[in-house]
Amino acid sequence: KFGANEHIATRLFQLAKKLNLNIVGCAFHVGTGCYDDNAFQHALQFAQHIFQIAKKYQFHLTILDIGGGFPGFDEDHRPSFSQLAQTIRQSLDEFFPQRENIQIIAEPGRYFAAASMDLVASIIACRSNNKDYLNFSSKEEKENVDKDLIDYVYYINESTYGSLSNILYENTTYSITCLRKEHSQLIKHGETKYKSIVYGPTCDSSDIVSLAVDLPLLNIGDHLLIYHVGAYSNSFSTKFNGFQTIKYFYIWKD
């Protein structure tokens, strides 16, 4: 969608020379939420080639913008920030060993924004997919059931069409815990957890917040606490199905 390959870059340098324009740098972006740290290695290798082409046309490039794509928190299926930083450092040493006169710019937007916000969502409906379990009356009967055969389904008042849109667009997996309405209490130590599914409130069957999260038995009115949703949440929110966008509360701490 964006950018220039070697052929186009060469033509741009030629045109700039003809128009007496000065080109001072090269920029790239590997894509938001980078899945592969090798993407930076390949991009920096190509950037080195662009610097060489520029030199051929008497342009002295002094700026290298390596873009963004840095995660705001660690996920199992993506490289961590430290892994990306190590790859970038090694690639810079390989492709730009003498870079004293090159200003290197990065764009770590998600890195700063993601962990700055947590989401508190209310449970507005719930059910179990195990009818036998629901019919048990005693605590002993319920304790003897294989917990792997039970799953609970919760519906919350925020969706992937709202501030959780990263789940749809970037396959983000958020860390989720719970707050009970009585005591604002997190999960108790040693408390039994069940395989749970969390849906948003819309009519869309793909409005899935989590297909597999371990949670204790919760009720309507309890809350789920979803961590690190600060990046591309408010900016991507919609009013799909007539649901309003959420309220934001800002907290400053010394």
Image: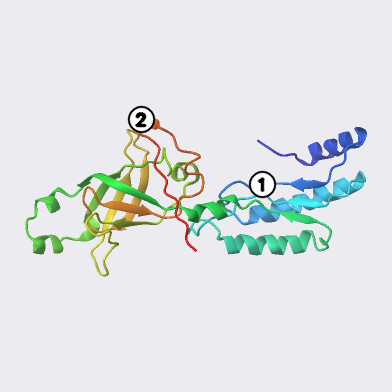
The x, y position of residue 96, in whole percent, is: 79, 59
The x, y position of residue 85, in whole percent, is: 64, 62
Q: Which residue is mark 1?
A: 29
**Which residue is at the far left?**
137
Q: How many callouts does the rendering have?
A: 2
Which of 209/10 is in front? 209
From the viewer's perspective, tell me whether residue 227 is left or right of residue 197: right
The disc, 1 or 2, on the residue closer to the chain's N-terminal end is: 1
From the viewer's perspective, tell me whether residue 99 is left or right of residue 124: right
Examine the rendered structure and indicate whether residue 153 appears above or below residue 141.
above
Q: Is residue 168 something that shows in the picture?
A: yes
Question: Of the residues shown, which amino acid type is indicated by label 2?
Answer: Asn
Which of 99/213 is in front? 99
Is label 1 in contact with label 2 (beta carbons under 8 Å)? no
**Residue 41 placement: quadrant:** bottom right
**Residue 94 placement: quadrant:** bottom right
The x, y position of residue 176, in whole percent, is: 36, 55
From the viewer's perspective, tell me whether residue 93 is left or right of residue 31: right
Tell me the crowding category of disc 2: few under 14, some 14 to 19, or many 20 or more residues within 10 angstroms, Cα based: few
Q: Which residue is mark 2?
A: 241
Q: Nearer the viewer, mark 1 or mark 2?
A: 2
* Residue located 78% across and 59% down the image: 95
* Residue located 84% across and 58% down the image: 101
**Which residue is at the far bottom?**
190
Callout 1: helix, strand or loop? loop
